[in-house]
Image (cartoon, rainbow, N blue to C red):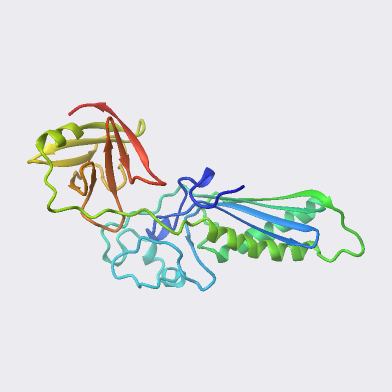
């Protein structure tokens, strides 16, 4: 059993950061059997480039202002170098790419292969991944692919699947795995409820400083009858940037959001915990002090 999407090593994987897409991806897999020969591929797509389908469409992207509805990878690639710059196309909420990317993959077959054949299989399949991730293998991508044989199916004069043809099949499977790594549903943002007015005692209950790590803290305070979030650690906390406090808008009794921008964002309070983007990709902070 190998779950595709935001599981295992793919739990916090992302793609498309070079263009500011910052879409969620994960781990993906695909399998094919040809006679007695079995081929399985697995990949964790944490890529600087954007995942692209077989029609050239960008699979997932938090688009910038005025971007086409049917966004294609070639739209972004042809617009380079402008499209890789922060603030491109007049989008103020377009950060620079996060230079921490690794797409790690493996091809496994039960056909007996020599070390030289395995090395060529790895090169062939890894090169093919540039179709499904654009751009691919940049200087900021720590990409690697392993090729493995279990040596269960012996080769001989009458073999019907040469190693090169296994590479062809595995290359197409790897594109399937790349696509399977991207969840159909991305992070969403609730709409604030303009008619919801929370009492002061409820807001004061949420005030305090919450720690996500030794580098990231979020301080929530009550100002003029409303909650305000500030990043008070060394790093930003998603859409709450250091030095730029964000008013929190109530969506429910315990869930808040910010003014809608390019990237979705919500906060849920649960006792002494604060949960950023509740759901599959949530990050939890723990109260370290009351305001």
Q: For this rendering, which residue is in front, 258 or 67? A: 258
User: Do we see residue 207 in this rendering?
Assistant: no
Q: For this rendering, which residue is in front, 96 or 290? A: 290
At horizontal 33% and vertical 46% (from top left) the residue drawn is: 277
In the rendered image, residue 75, in percent from the top left (x then y), is placed at 42, 72
| Quadrant hosting residue 23 | bottom left
Q: For this rendering, which residue is in front, 17 or 110? A: 110
130 displayed left or right of 112: left
Q: In the current view of this chain or complex, which residue is farthest to the right?
A: 157
In the rendered image, residue 240, in percent from the top left (x then y), is placed at 26, 45
User: Do we see residue 123 in this rendering?
Assistant: yes
In the rendered image, residue 186, in percent from the top left (x then y), is placed at 40, 56
3 displayed left or right of 291: right
Q: In the current view of this chain or complex, which residue is farthest to the top?
A: 289
14 displayed left or right of 109: left
| Quadrant hosting residue 267 | top left
The C terminus - image quarter: top left
Q: For this rendering, which residue is in front, 242 or 8? A: 8
At horizontal 25% and vertical 42% (from top left) the residue drawn is: 242
């Amino acid at each position: 059993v190998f779950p595709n999407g935001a599981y295992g090593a793919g739990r916090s994987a992302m793609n498309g950061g070079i263009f500011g897409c910052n879409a969620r991806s994960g781990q993906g897999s695909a399998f094919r059997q040809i006679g007695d020969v079995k081929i399985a591929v697995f990949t964790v797509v944490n890529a600087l480039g954007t995942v692209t389908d077989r029609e050239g469409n960008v699979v997932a992207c938090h688009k910038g202002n005025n971007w086409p509805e049917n966004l294609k990878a070639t739209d972004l690639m042809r617009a380079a170098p402008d499209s890789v710059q922060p603030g491109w196309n007049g989008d103020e909420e377009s950060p620079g790419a996060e230079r921490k990317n690794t797409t790690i993959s493996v091809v496994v077959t039960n056909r007996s292969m020599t070390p030289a054949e395995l090395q060529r299989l790895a090169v062939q399949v890894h090169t093919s991944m540039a179709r499904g991730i654009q751009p691919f293998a940049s200087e900021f991508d720590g990409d690697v692919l392993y090729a493995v044989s279990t040596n269960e199916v012996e080769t001989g004069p009458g073999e019907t699947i040469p190693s090169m043809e296994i590479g062809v099949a595995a290359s197409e499977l790897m594109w399937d795995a790349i696509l399977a790594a991207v969840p159909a549903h991305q992070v969403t943002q609730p709409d604030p409820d303009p008619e919801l007015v929370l009492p002061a005692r409820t807001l004061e209950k949420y005030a305090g400083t919450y720690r996500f790590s030794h580098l990231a803290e979020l301080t929530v305070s009550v100002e003029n009858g409303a909650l305000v979030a500030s990043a008070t650690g060394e790093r930003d906390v998603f859409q709450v940037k250091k030095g730029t406090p964000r008013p929190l808008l109530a969506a429910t009794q315990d869930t808040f959001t910010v003014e809608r921008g390019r990237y979705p964002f919500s906060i849920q309070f649960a006792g002494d915990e604060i949960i950023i983007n509740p759901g599959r990709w949530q990050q939890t902070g723990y109260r370290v002090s009351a305001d």
